[in-house]
Amino acid sequence: MSNGSTLPETDVPRLSRWLQWRIFVRSLALQGSWNGQRMQNLGLLVTFFPWLRRQHWDINRDRLFCRRYFEYFNTNPYLANLLIGGLIRLETEHAARGEDPTLMARRFRDSLCRAFASLGDQLFWLGLRPALTMALCLLGMYGLIKPIFLIVAVFAALQLFLRFWALGRSYELGLDIVDLINHPHWHRAISWTKRAAMVLTGAVAGRYLSSVGNWDFMAGKGLLWVGMALGIGLPLILRRRLPGEALLGLALGLALLLSFAI
Amino acid sequence: MLLFPAALIGDTSLLSLGVLGLVAAFAAIDDVSVGQTWFGQPLVIALITGFFCGDPMTGLAIGLPLQLVLAGNLPVGQTFTGDSGVALTAAVAAACLSGRVFVPDLEQVGFADLGLLGWIILAGGLLSALGHPIIQAERKANGLLMLQGHKTLRDGSLVRMEAIHLRCLATTFGRGFVLVMLYLLLLMKLWLPAYVYLPGKIHQALGMLPLLLPGLGVGTMIDRYGLRKGWAWLLAGLLIMLALAALGV
């Protein structure tokens, strides 16, 4: 997308590595002051401060800047830097032209934060996280500790690198970051991570079922099979997404029933 | 505050309690505030705690069933549920510091010790549920602190905004540190000693808990993806593992 408000590349000050690093470090704590009213607003505002301090504006302009970003803001933390870099570019361009960016910044922020929240939730919370969790559990079922740490460390390093890269890339793209959202790779990645999560869930179920066959120390093993089938079936029967802690209570109730039945 | 539980737990050194406090504080802050590296997930933090206590296998034995049953909990904004990181740190540390040793292979644990393992797992789940209203209260406090930022909208003081943000972060860090001390005290002085007074049938039921939890976890995940939509992928994973088991892998 080519946008009329974007300055030619040569006129836009570069985002220095040091400044990018400082903004990145702060962006990691985007959710640090999460609140029910305006969610990540304070985290977002504080993330901008290294850039804002370099502008050496008067108090009135600082005050107006804070007012712009003190409003409701919520997005996926892993993709937030794609938006933060774009907003810094927008602010930089408007500052260079001496224009007020309030309306444009608000529109850009509000539309993109929803889009990235939706993409991020699908990709990270419903795709990657369950897939990784199931992979870790499968390794745990084999008693493999080192690979568990390795996988989590690799994921952590990769996501931190991508968040740093995203900041620089979105600053380069400016408003054209919108094009990135339309890329079909997002939906392919979401659908493949979900499939991977399903295969791994099936694998955990397989490992679990095959180990139950070895539990000869259990009295009333037949009843345990019933309990296990009920355990797997209960969330499907209830059709309600209960928190894990509530499921633990259900499991305890089931165990008590089985215990008194044996 | 820190000396209080240390003195009661007895031979546990202040240094090891400090390390455990830092692990729990890291878990609290990683889960939702900073980085979200997933080192704060129940299984991983249980392993880390076990590692610091010299017995990562006990961490695995306690963390694995809980990770499976908590797999459906997502740390997303308002839907954030429980405080599993801090709870797991306390549960694993209490087991290790009181000399209880478990292995993830439930066959080797034996039925006699499975009850105690179930008792500790139950404690982990209950403490996680107990942490939920505390996190919600913390978030309400964040909201009140955030509103103080309106003063900056009048006077332009950036330092105030940063101070508010840091206070919120410090509160989360402090919550993890303080709660794990209190939980440890509770588990080591009340919860674990209470196990021997429970009737035999309850011991038996608790022994089944680690056996049933993975099933519930798997059921939750299947429900999340939809059995009708994902049955082919689920079946593929299931068959691969059953084939591997048949081959003795």
Image (spheres, coloured by chain):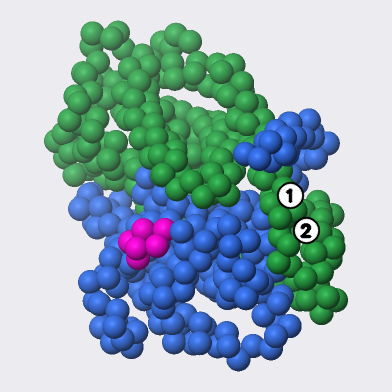
Chain colours: A green, B blue
Q: Does B249 sit above or below residue A226?
A: above
Amino acid type at mark 2: Met
Q: Quadrant of residue B117?
A: bottom right
What's the mark number on residue B203?
Answer: none
Task: Answer whether residue B52 is magenta in the image.
Answer: yes
| Residue A57 is one of the magenta-drawn residues | no
Q: Look at 59% across and 16% down and name the residue there.
A: A184
Do marks 1 and 2 share a subunit?
Answer: yes
Q: Residue at x 83, y 36 (%)?
A: B228
Q: Residues within 10 Å of mark 2 (few under 14, many from 20)?
A: many
Residue A178 position within the rendered picture, expressed as x and y whole percent measured from the top left: 49, 20
Residue B231 in view of the camera: yes
Q: Label 1's element?
A: helix
Q: Quadrant of residue A23?
A: top left
Picture residue at 58% right of the left edge, 24% below the top: A189
Q: Identify the residue at horizontal 77%, vertical 71% (top origin).
A: A219
Where B249 falls versus B79 (above or below)? above
Q: The magenta stretch spans which residues?
A: B51-56
- Number of labels in the image equals 2
